[in-house]
Amino acid sequence: MIKTDILIIGAGPTGLFTVFEAGLLKLRCHLIDALPQAGGQCSEIYPKKPIYDIPAYPEILAGDLTDKLLEQSKQFEPGFTLGERAETIDKQEDGSFIVTTNKGTKHHAPIVAIAGGLGSFEPRKPPIPNIADFEDKGVEYIIRDPEMYRNKNVVISGGGDSALDWSIFLTDVAASVTLIHRRNEFRGALDSVDKVQELKDTGKIRLITPAEVIGISGKEKVTAVEVKQKDKENFIIDTDHFIPLFGLSPKLGPIGSWGLEIEKNAIKVNNALDYQTNIPGIYAIGDVNTYPGKLKLILCGFHEATLMCQSAYKRIFPDKKYVMKYTTVGGVDGFDGTRKEAPKAVIKKID
């Protein structure tokens, strides 16, 4: 039985930052993740994808962000159960929980924080009859290593942030980039839309709208795609890679049967207080939760994790009073694993 103060389900950016915030409160953390390494989607799906909205980083690769979060949390010595999926949860008489994985590993904690991102997921595939024949043979639904497209001809389909961001990024890598979208309007950030338009105007991106890829051809790998464009005859584009980026289809998996209030495949939480679910002691933070005005951004997950940890402290130590201390004043105390009780709050008057 693994015992901890906060059991975090999901070792992505939000889960990793929770370790740091909990550590400041001298709370132990243990993380469960179905993936074989920490980092969540940032490590598994797009480690080389640049992220532009992390404070103090004009641009940072998703994998590098994960590395820095791991480095930041390392001082608080979190535990990890990786390559195992949280399967069942049992509430104990004292209000604590036992979470068991699909491999039978049991974890006991008074607080459970679900930070599972989008949950388990699979890519949304376009309805092209023979697309499965070319998967991993020039058809990729996820870009893990941009270098594989070095000096190659690439066709990307999609109208969201991923399609826009990767189209922009690959202009400096690929021999050619063609972006195809079935509408004239894009769903991504306005900044990215403007950048794509600028690259189109300078001839660095071929933009085809409204249109869609309806066929793939090749022998051992992709050599061309067939494009259907509105009010025009179908035409062929020679290419080395076809990358349909239509997003991921998320599934909560076993967590969906835990008695939590679910809305549109996300866990409802009370954002007016502490991101707690309908079950006291169970919180949901990051992309896995929903509430009025929710934004699925990493930085929002960081904020939710911070408030959640404050609430968790109060639940674990209802008789203790905690006074927040800024790290700029008190620094970050290392965690030596010997804590027996909550730290005493110190109030210092300023003359």
Image (spheres, rainbow, N blue to C red):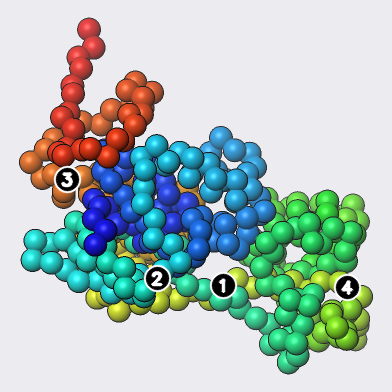
- Please rate how many residues cluster around mark 3, counting C-alpha atoms within 10 Å: few if below 14, some from 14 to 19, many from 20: few
Q: Name the residue under label 3.
A: 314
Q: Name the residue under label 1.
A: 248
Q: What residue type is labelled 3?
A: Lys
- Assign the N terminus to one quadrant of the image: bottom left
Residue 108, given in percent of the width and then of the height, sits at: 22, 60
Q: Residue at x 20, y 71 (%)?
A: 90
**Is residue 17 in sight in this rendering?**
yes
Q: Which of marks 3 and 2 is nearer the N terminus?
A: 2
- Spatial CA distance of label 1 from label 3 is 36 Å
| Local SS, label 2 | loop
- Spatial CA distance of label 2 from label 1 is 19 Å
Q: Which of 46 and 349 is in front in this view?
A: 46
Q: Which amino acid does label 2 sit on?
A: Arg
- Assign the C terminus to one quadrant of the image: top left
| Local SS, label 1 | strand
In the picture as drawn, the residue positioned furthest to the bottom comes out as 129
| Local SS, label 3 | helix
Q: Which residue is drawn at 26% across and 58% down?
A: 2
Residue 151, given in percent of the width and then of the height, sits at: 89, 59
- Spatial CA distance of label 3 from label 2 is 28 Å
* Mark 4 in CB contact with mark 1 (< 8 angstroms): no
Q: Which mark is residue 239?
A: 4
Q: Mark 2 points at which residue?
A: 85
